[in-house]
């Protein structure tokens, strides 16, 4: 069964990311979307352990790393589950993301749903899409 989740950026950053996983076991998570109002260049893109956004990224804890791996790039074999690599921001302040991640899941005990997406000093929570309305409010700080 496919599962969808969304992360909506509000406040200084504006945009959304859609997470889609087609299969419950060993399925790749496809992340698409765009984020606006960023500075030009490469930005780190991570999922953090907690979805607690009080006090900015301080309460989000470290990168999500349930298997105690070494920090690495998204293409590295050895990496945290939360290591999604970098996204490139164009001169207009917009980052467009269309990437697939084999090490991320939306199912089971190691799901990233409810955890935060962090880009520099901005933090947002990934929420499962409501099955009836297909939308859910996302808290951002």
Image (cartoon, rainbow, N blue to C red):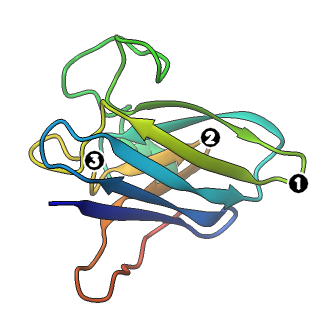
Discs 1, 2 touching: Cβ within 8 Å? no
Alpha-carbon span between mark 2 and mark 3: 19 Å
Residue 112's disc is: 3
The residue sitting at 46% across, 50% down in the picture is: 31
Position above or below: 38 against 134: above
Quick check: 63 left or right of 110? right
- Disc 2 to disc 3: CB gap under 8 Å: no
Q: Which mark is residue 120?
A: 2
**Residue 59 visible in the shown view:** no
Residue 92 is marked as: 1
The location of residue 61, given as percent across then percent down, is 36, 38
Could you say where residue 54 lies in the image, as x and y percent from the top left? Answer: 42, 59
Residue visible at 16% across and 40% down?
A: 110
In the rendered image, the residue lying farthest to the bottom is 133
At 24% from the left and 61% from the top, the residue drawn is 3
In space, the residues marked 1 and 2 are separated at their CA atoms by 18 Å
Q: Residue at x 44, y 70 (%)?
A: 139
Dot 1 or dot 2: first in sequence order is: 1
Which label's residue is closer to the chain start, 2 or 3?
Answer: 3
Disc 2 element: loop
- Percent position of residue 77, x then y: 35, 12
> Can residue 23 be seen?
yes
Does residue 102 appear left or right of residue 44 in this picture? left
């Amino acid at each position: 069964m496919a599962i969808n989740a969304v992360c909506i950026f509000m406040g200084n950053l504006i945009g959304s990311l859609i997470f889609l996983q087609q299969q419950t076991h060993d399925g790749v998570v496809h992340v698409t979307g765009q984020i606006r109002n960023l500075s030009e260049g490469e930005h780190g893109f991570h999922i953090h352990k907690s979805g607690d956004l009080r006090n900015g990224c301080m309460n989000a804890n470290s990168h999500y790393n349930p298997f105690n791996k070494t920090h690495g790039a998204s293409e590295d074999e050895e990496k945290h589950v939360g290591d999604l690599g970098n996204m490139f921001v164009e001169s207009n302040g917009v980052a467009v993301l269309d990437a697939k991640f084999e090490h991320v899941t939306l199912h089971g005990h190691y799901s990233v749903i409810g955890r935060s997406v962090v880009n520099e000093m901005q933090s947002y929570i990934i929420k499962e899409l409501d099955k009836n309305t297909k939308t859910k409010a996302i808290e951002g700080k």
